Amino acid sequence: MPSTLAARLAKEWRQSGPGYMFLLPWLVGFFGLTLGPTLASLYLSFTDYDLLTSPSWAGLDNYEYAFTRDRRLGNALEVTFTYVLFSVPLKLAVALLLAMVLDRSVRGVAFYRATYYLPSLLGASVAIAVLWRQIFGAEGLFNQLLLVLFGWQGPAWVTHPDYALSTLVVLAIWQFGSPMIIFLAGLRQIPQDLYEAASMDGASGWRQFWRITLPLLAPVIFFNLVLQTIEGFKAFTQAFIVSGGTGGPIDSTLFYSLYLYEEAFANFRMGYASALAWLLLVIIAIFTAIAFWSSKYWVYYEDEAR
């Protein structure tokens, strides 16, 4: 019997062993860097933990404080929702517009595609955030242009509470390269004979866009919408650099992730920060679920029976 079991294990190893060996680096990363810290943060969210002493069990105190007494959390949610509400649709609109322009056969189109994609590679970096703060500062390039063109001295856009969040929305829109590339790939999949038939029937370009392009591009729009919404809720670097890590002025750029960072690494309230992280996960899950539920009303798949 033992020899039979050993023979079966040896056969199983010969058949599946190499595959598991290839998966081993991913499994180590998943359990050690993703699943393990995730479960640890779930436990810490029910504790008081300051990184210096052992965590002590606090039950639901962290969640009770977040829902009933933390006013800064309410402000962080308002800032983050506003940022997502404006930055995601505007970024997708700009990305789709430029994708349609670049989908045309023009000279040097490869160069333009690479140039327009460049902001997405640089947009979230620290260097670009610092550059953005300089451009929209009181004496920055943007105000210099306003002064030369219109004779008007603009405010310090990144340090004025009425305009600081708007400058971050503009920075997010500037990172349109990634969704643009995905839109461009989707546009290439639309059969050209549909446009030719529509043109022969006298349909205008605008009507072709609404009746052909948008319906057939709906799965790609849906994919970009979910992806960019999640990225919007996770936005951190821009607000951290532009506000100096404070979320100022007057908490006008206090993104949810920035507030979470403050609680964890500035106030050393790791237990409460873990609770905030799980609340963010729930918020993103709710918005993603709403997007998937609504998709049955506006997303069309070619192989789908209607």
Image: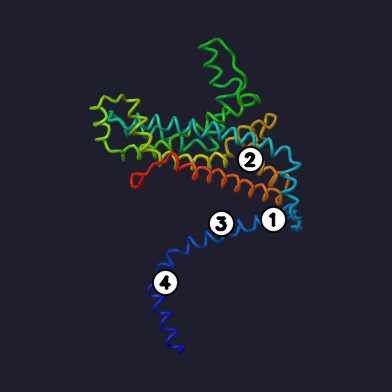
Residue type of the residue flagged with mark 1: Leu
Q: Which mark is residue 17?
A: 4
Q: Can you name the residue that lies furthest to the top here? A: 151
Looking at the image, tell me whether mark 2 or mark 3 is earlier in sequence order.
Answer: 3
Q: Position of residue 218 (x, y in %)?
A: 40, 39
Give the label on residue 256, or none: 2
Type of the residue with mark 2? Tyr
Question: Visible in this render: residue 198?
Answer: yes
Farthest-out residue, front: 306
- Mark 1 = which residue? 44
Splitting the image into 4 quarters, where does residue 251 fall? top right
Q: Identity of the amino acid at label 3? A: Thr
Pick the residue in front: 100 or 173: 100
Disc 4 versus disc 1: nearer the observer: 1
Q: Residues within 10 Å of mark 4 (few under 14, many from 20)?
A: few
Q: Nearer the N terminus, badge 2 or badge 1?
A: 1
SS category of the residue bearing label 4: helix
Q: Secondary structure at mark 3?
A: helix
Tell me the residue that label 3 is attached to: 34
Q: How many marks?
A: 4
Measured Cα–Cα span from mark 4 to mark 3: 24 Å
In the rendered image, which quarter is residue 244 located in? Answer: top right
Indicate which disc, 1 or 3, sits on the residue closer to the N terminus.
3
Looking at the image, which residue is at 41% across and 81% down?
8
